[in-house]
Image (cartoon, rainbow, N blue to C red):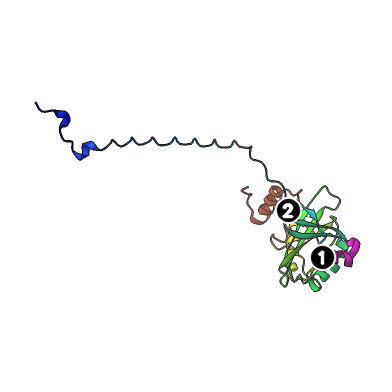
Amino acid sequence: MADESKAPQSPESSKPEAPAPAPPPAAKSAAPPASPGTAKPASPPVQARLDNDLTKRYRQRFAAAILDALEDRKQPYLVIDSTKLLDIARYSRAEEEFDLLEDFTAVDWPRREKRFDLIAILYSFPHNTRLRLKIPIAETERPASLVEIWPTADWLEREIFDMFGIVFAGHPGLKRILLPDEWQGHPLRKDYDILRQDRAWIRENLGIESGQ
């Protein structure tokens, strides 16, 4: 009988067996979603006192009329006395070359002695920079119009008058610009009842009831 142990082996049978493939790594479990209300609220922007060359020039020129100088979101703004608004505006245009009144609006603080803040955003093309002027005014105060310095103030002041009821002394044609002339009240005042006023105007002028 032939000795099977001495039988020649095929090349395939002489190769060692390949190791078994490693099992795939276990998938990492996804982090549980954050429950509502657990996210840390963003911190409000920090307003820092400002004492750069620009504010020094304003302080040197207008002294106590510059009530404060701050930096907010890397932009300077000055809080100014409303009685010096026209003088400061003329200086800003002629001397500091803020040749554009980019925006002009207001904020209502009904519990404050000086109820409104006027906010003027100035832009200088030669210097590619902005400056904000904040002007606190009383409810009955009539701040000076800026139309003679920046013509864009015309429609911007009309919008402030329309929405807040602030009257600008010297404006060439102060009347509503967004709402009908006969509209009652000023919608961006905090004490304005928009539903009551809206219903009254629609009933009177369109003869229907408001859908709000």
Which residue is at 81% across, 60% downward?
78
Which residue is tagged 1?
53
Measure the C-alpha gap from mark 2 to mark 1. Answer: 36 Å
Q: Is residue 39 left or right of residue 185?
A: left
Q: Secondary structure at mark 2?
A: loop
In the displayed structure, does residue 39 sit left or right of residue 64? left
**Residue 5 location (% of width, % of height):** 17, 29
Under circle 1, the secondary element is helix
Residue at image location 80% in from the left, 74% down from the top: 94
Q: On the rendered structure, is 6 left or right of 96?
A: left
Q: Which residue is mark 2?
A: 188
Provide residue 135's location: percent of width, then percent of height: 82, 59
Q: Comparing marks 2 and 1, which lies closer to the viewer?
A: 1
Q: What kind of residue is marked 1?
A: Asp
What segment carries the magenta color?
53-65
The quarter of the displayed image where residue 156 is located: bottom right
Looking at the image, residue 196 sits to the left or right of residue 82; the answer is left
